[in-house]
Image (cartoon, rainbow, N blue to C red):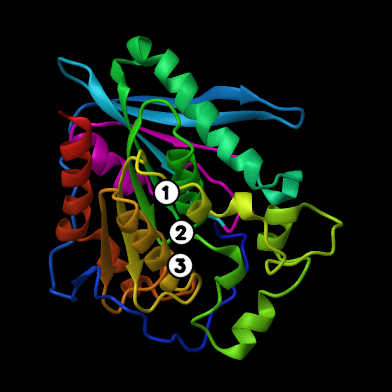
Amino acid sequence: MSSIEFRVAKSIAPSDNSTSVVIPPTGSPQFSLKGLDLARYVDVPFAEHSHRSLLLDLLVPVGPGPKPLVVYVTGGGFVDADKGNAQHLRTCLAESGFAVASIQYRTVGEGAVYTDGIADVQDAVAFLRAKAEDFGFDGARVGLLGESAGGYLVTMAGLEHTPGVQAVVNKFGIVDFGTIAEDYDADMQAALDGADYPLALYLHGKGTGKTVHDLVPDASPLNHITDEAPAFQIWHGTADCIISPSQTLRLHNALREAGVDSTRYVLDGADHGDVSALLGRPDEALPWYTEQVVGLTVDFFRKHLEN
């Protein structure tokens, strides 16, 4: 993700947290790894496209019995999709008893649009389910976890009823392209309102002259929600300077209105995950890696994938 030039808001309007669980900065310790034995598979091809093969990395706990699968989809502004991201978090999930895959997906630099990214997530899930016995996990029990751009992709893949998916974690992911900067200052809103901005390119493709405000109803998760959606856990920080907190609030409220099991956690004072570290403020990323926060996600996947 280091190659991305992030647009950062100068101010953020407060949003309604009445339907969410607010987590204050409690000083919970950072989670630590245990050094458990994990089988590691690197650069496994799962899909072929004209430009390249798409690859995934996989961690599988060593021990008896098939493990549930969690597929991690990284962020990167739809410009970058480095499957090596979040290695510490992925290892923690694997040490908690899950097989964990991290996947590549096509980006705007390859001319990809949102339907391509969703298809890449679905292809990865289909490949992993077909190979589950070979790798030693349970392909019938699948969870998705995505951050930022990856949060959008796992949300869409979950709402499009990707076979096997029973639980989705969206961490500060886009929901409505046209209102992504709604909570921000005028300069930030103007910066995102261009036909060459990656979000517009990912929505419409190159050369269309369209912006994020030229709506594509099919691209909005809000238009794919039914009462048959998998369970959701949703996360956002109140100080997110990249994707406005009202994005995930819209998703959470719409899921609840449809009768879907959805819980939204708001980290008071937290920014956009690892972006703080990339911007030279590593201490501001720490709230995302506490035992409390990571533990809630582990508990969520255990509840919905281990039954």
Q: Quadrant of residue 251?
A: bottom left
* Mark 3 or 2, nearer chain start: 2
What residue is disc 2 on? Answer: 173
Q: Residue at x 15, y 59 (%)?
A: 292
What residue is disc 3 on? Answer: 247
Q: Is residue 40 above or below residue 233?
A: above
In this orientation, which residue lies closer to the viewer: 168 or 290? 168
What is the crowding at mark 3: few (fewer than 14 residues within 10 Å), some, or many (at least 20)? many
Residue type, label 2: Gly
* Local SS, label 2: loop
* Local SS, label 1: strand
Q: Disc 3 and disc 1: Cα gap in Å?
A: 15 Å
- Residue 146 image label: 1
Contact? badges 3 and 2 (CB < 8 Å): yes
Residue type, label 3: Gln
In this orientation, which residue lies closer to the viewer: 87 or 209? 209
Q: Is residue 242 above or below residue 304?
A: below
Q: Disc 3 and disc 2: Cα gap in Å?
A: 7 Å
Q: Residue at x 68, y 55 (%)?
A: 203
